[in-house]
Image (cartoon, coloured by chain):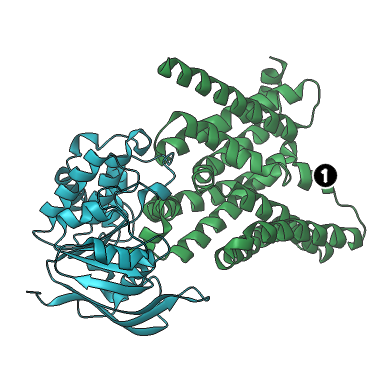
Amino acid sequence: MIARPVIELAGIYAGYGGPNVLQDVTLDVGGGEFLGLVGPNGGGKSTLLKVILGLLRPTRGQVRVLGTAPLRARRQVGYVPQYVEFARDFPISVGGVVLMGRLGQSPPLFGYRRCDRAIAMHSLREVGLVDLCERPIGELSGGQFQRVLIARALATEPEILLLDEPTANLDPRAERDLFGLLKKLNRRMTILVVTHDIAFVSEYVARVACLNRELVCHTTEPLTAETIERLYGHPIRFVQHEGHG
Amino acid sequence: MEFLHALMDFTFLQNALLGGFLASLGCGVIGPYVVVKRISYLVGGIAHAVLGGVGVAYYFDWSPFGGALAAAVLAALLIGWVSLRWRLQEDMLIGAFWAGGMAIGILFISRAPGYNVDLMSYLFGNILLITRDDLLLMAGLDAVILALVMVFHRQFQAVCFDEQFARLRGVGVTQFYLLLLCMVALTLVLLIQVVGLILVIALVSLPAAVAGQWVRSLGAMMLLATILGAVVTLFGLGLSYGPDLPSGATIVLVSALAYFLSTLMMGIRKRRVQG
């Protein structure tokens, strides 16, 4: 049973001037769903997120987010980018990063309001890092920084949460904790998580979509070895998952 | 000591020191953005392109200060725009503006009627020639920079930290990036009188880089970089006064030494923490 779709993609083609990275991708994500988007590197997962966020215009096809154009829905979408790409020597505290999530809502001039700070603290509490509020981000572990980015996205008070490879470079324990947290958040928001970590994702999410330029499979039942083989073009062992990022 | 006595007696030295302090304020506030955004090469390009404006102003007998200001803002907008538009070729494009701007300046100055230009003072600065009017102008530029930073600090910080997220939050990333570069341009004009356009990049980036090694927030970096800039100016001016050395070069050398010293101390401290 799928509730009213909050993300609707119909026949999407998209790319960066060269060959299409996405080909004829059609996908509906229902309200309150927890969807895992898996696929090989270069398969277009991040590109699909860009299309949903309105950062990239598809060359063909229709995108609707929360029933409207992606650009207009942006404020209701929380985005958690790949944390590996950050310069961690940037002089800013955990609280400072989370407050950035308030930028769209807070008035544009001067500082943050008291309610912005309260919301930021609440988001930090949700990811379990409220004690590290004053800590510079350079002193965090990878897993902690990943949670800070999630808190920043939560501070935007989103209806949909998009995460790009949140488990890259995390150890299995941190990975498990992270999916536990997402499961909790899923009670009140739709979550779409991009990952190449098939084994983990299939344990937690309700539905998995597989993307390799085209949407290869799109199942409600648990992922089987057969569909993985179809996706990657060769058999791979289910339990063995290496952290290639 | 001799310098301190002279400082009591001579207005030109007092003006020089005050000018140095005003410049330290501007680059102390802007420098941290330049350092954390890693755009010192781009800023170097803007600084050198300023000579083009100075040359044109001389040729047409306009105010060289006005020429420098206009050229700095124009160069900031142009270089900023091309670096956003053609990111992959950013390096080469900045180099072209850097050299092209200087070449325009040299050509116009060579054709300027009368050729009575002290080119050296633009290239290497002349802090000892700062007048009361210059000081007023410098204070005005400082006020503009400070006011903009106070109003838009959150946006500048977001653009430096994570452009994509800032864009998703509805921040006009392109506009704020270009505004930031224009403020950098104002800072450069402030500093050109002090150390000259060749060495200006040192005073924008080095005090901020030193501060970045010791404190962990942009605000603290600004405060510390301003103080460091003032201290470096004072020392450089004092050291150069006795033996009559070029003051701009001395100030820059002192700040470079401060940076190496700080890096060294940082390394020792890290080793101690790990060991």
Dot 1: what SS? helix
On screen, residue B174 above or below B181: below
Q: Chain of mark 1?
A: B
Q: Is residue A205 above or below residue B5?
A: below
The hue used for chain B is: green
Image spot of residue B64 (x, y percent): 75, 57
Question: In front: A169, or B67?
Answer: A169
Count of numbered labels shown in the rendering: 1
Q: Based on the displayed image, in which of its 4 quarters is residue B272 positioned?
A: top left
Mark 1 residue type: Met
Answer left or right for B242 relative to A174: right
Q: Residues within 10 Å of mark 1 (few under 14, many from 20)?
A: few
Q: Residue A81, position in %: x, y?
A: 34, 56
The one nearer the camera, B212 or B242, is B212
- Outermost residue, right side: B114
Q: Which chain is cyan?
A: A
Query: Which quadrant of the figure has residue A37?
Result: bottom left
Q: Position of residue A195 (x, y in %)?
A: 30, 57
Q: Please tell me whether residue A181 is drawn above or below residue B232 in the rendered image.
A: below
Residue B194 pos. (x, y %): 69, 40
| The N terminus of chain A sits in image quarter | bottom left
Taking the image as drawn, is residue A220 in sight? Answer: yes
x 79%, y 64%: residue: B56
Question: In the picture, residue B12 is in which quadrant?
Answer: top right
Q: Which residue is mark 1?
A: B120
Residue found 42% across the figure and 19% down from its top: B274
- Is residue B214 rendered to the left or right of residue B58? left
User: Which residue is at a point 18% across and 50% down the rendered structure image?
Assistant: A179
The answer to whether residue B130 of the structure is visible from this angle is: no
